[in-house]
Amino acid sequence: MDPETRRGIAQRALGRARAQGVALEDDQVFMALLDEWIEGKIPMRMMRERYFAAFAQRERKPVGRRNSETVVGHNQTTQPLSAEGDKKEGPSVETAAHEL
């Protein structure tokens, strides 16, 4: 598959993700891997594996100190935790990346 075909596929997939509320364009790791795939340097399977590994590592990295009442992040602001912790709603990154 040539790079122009891959670029078209990527643009359509990014558009679908954006329509679902996932701005993958803002994720530098994802976009770097996507560029490698578009250029034919890595297959999609490797792109997905590398992205999920980077995503998992990012999720494990502590953001700040926690106690049962507040979260203190890098900018030293505090926010109360919800009953469900830090869970975010909306489509998952895995769902959006799978569509590529």
Image: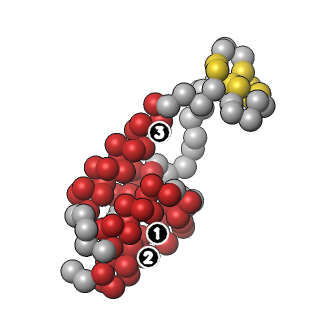
Q: Which mark, residue 90?
A: none
Distance in Å between CA atoms under marks 1 and 3: 21 Å
Write down the residue under mark 1: 14
Q: What residue type is labelled 3?
A: Arg
Residue at 58 percent across and 40 percent down: it is 88
Residue 23 image offset from top left, x and y in percent: 55, 61
Judged left or right of residue 33, residue 46 is left
Q: Which mark, residue 58?
A: 3
In the rendered view of the protein, which quadrant contains the C terminus? bottom left
Q: Are marks 1 and 2 in contact (CB under 8 Å)?
A: yes
Distance in Å between CA atoms under marks 2 and 3: 25 Å
Q: What residue type is labelled 1?
A: Leu
Which element is circle 2 on?
Answer: helix
Residue 6 image offset from top left, x and y in percent: 31, 78
Residue at 46 percent across and 49 percent down: it is 92
Residue 74 visible to the viewer: yes
Front of the two marks 2 and 3: 3
Q: In this view, does 64 lie above or below 32?
A: above
Q: Do the residues labelled 2 and 3 touch (CB within 8 Å)?
A: no
Write down the residue under mark 2: 11
Outermost residue on the right side: it is: 77
Callout 3 environment at 10 Å: few (<14), some (14 to 19), or many (20+)?
few
Marked residue nearer the N-terminal end (2 or 3): 2
